[in-house]
Image (spheres, rainbow, N blue to C red):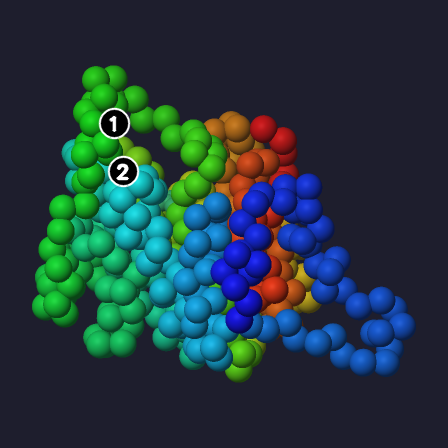
Amino acid sequence: MSSRKSFIKSATLSGMGVLLGSNLMAEPNKEDKKTKPTAIRKPLVLSTWRFGIQANEAAWAILGKGGKALDAVEAGVKIPEGDPKERSVGYGGRPDRDGRVTLDACIMDELGNIGSVAALEHIKHPISVARAVMEKTPHVMLVGDGALQFALEQGFPKENLLVEDSEKEWKEWLKKSEYKPIANIENHDTIGMIALDENGNLSGACTTSGMAYKMHGRVGDSPIIGAGLYVDNEIGAATATGHGEEVIRIVGCHLVVELMRQGKNPEDACKEAVARVVNLMKVRGKNLKDIQVGFIAINKQGEHGSYCVQSGFNYAICDGKSNVLVDSAYHSKV
Ligand code: GLY
């Protein structure tokens, strides 16, 4: 592998976003199409938002050595989960309105194995608990106290996840207690990561502290297989970020993968899923400006793409030659 410095082009190449985020690069010219099949571009890892750059780096440490996509996505998303400065994932995440940090995460491998935890407290790496649910229980999802009990039995340490600065912000919020999620407020949210490994296998992981100051017990899309994440090793993988209620409403990531099965390229599949979100907002008389939803997707050929409701969503793509943050194509400009 090349040196870290040359490998990580972490500067925001926003001008290149649409090009890199679309399938234009993957599309062979007409002559090539006739004579040779498109080469599969692997390994490859994509993850949501700017913290995806560092997360991809950790994932690449595994993928670049021929490791499994499943191991890569777990290692990748653990980076923002463990970062006390990140306010939307894991340790340091914003609490619910009662001051409790409750975490949601799920993971899915190439065989259709799935594991998930929701409303899990006191555990820094919910993604690893989700993987333990997948590998060590006959179930696919554990929530709340049951998830915590399981995590402790598995040897995960019990920790305080509410960091001082986050507690201060929450106490400030309590003065008005207004619940008004704002799209792209910090240019990050959930981390969703999808990867294609050297063997051509796909896996994905998704983890979040959910909406800041949510009602206690609120669960978003991120731990829901089919909504926040879906992997079908014959077709492709997708993950989501943004307002989980809207993603759940359309079972977003399963939809994106099924649209790829029907022949859409990754960006067009994400675009169609966003169109469904937009349509249901309109039908219900809701203001589109109040929400953001973004999808990223990879197909089995290593083509990738993204689409979101409002401008401002970006994601990181790493293929070993570069690790770049690109702007997603979008439905409307903020
Ligand atoms: N997408 C994260 C959430 O809504 O909780």
Q: Looking at the image, in which quadrant does ligand 1 appear? A: top left
Instruction: Answer with left or right where residue 318 lies relative to residue 29.
Output: left
Contact between marks 2 and 1 (CB within 8 A): the answer is yes
User: Residue at coordinates 21% horizontally, 43% vertically from top-left?
Assistant: 101
Instruction: Answer with left or right where residue 299 lies relative to residue 171.
Output: right
* Residue 308, x across and y down, in percent: 57, 43
Q: Secondary structure at mark 2?
A: loop
- Residue at the top extreme? 176
Count neighbours of disc 1 (C-alpha within 10 A) and say few if under 14, some if 14 to 19, many if 20 or more.
few
Q: Whole-Å distance between the Cαs marked 2 and 1? A: 9 Å
**301 or 257, which is in the foreground?**
301
User: Residue at coordinates 32% horizontally, 26% vertically from top-left?
Assistant: 179
* Residue 208, x across and y down, in percent: 33, 49
Q: Secondary structure at mark 1?
A: helix
Q: Relative to 78, is 280 above or below?
A: above
**Mark 2 or mark 1: which comes first in sequence?**
2
Q: Relative to 94, is 143 above or below?
A: below
* Pointer 2 residue: 94
Count neighbours of disc 2 (C-alpha within 10 A) and say few if under 14, some if 14 to 19, many if 20 or more.
many
Instruction: Answer with left or right where residue 222 lies relative to residue 82.
Output: right
User: Residue at coordinates 47% horizontally, 59% vertically from top-left?
Assistant: 56
Q: Is residue 275 something that shows in the picture?
A: no
- Give the residue type at disc 1: Glu
* Residue 22, x across and y down, in percent: 68, 54
On residue 169, which mark appears? 1
Label 1, ligand 1: CB separation under 8 Å: no
**112 or 325, which is in the foreground?**
325
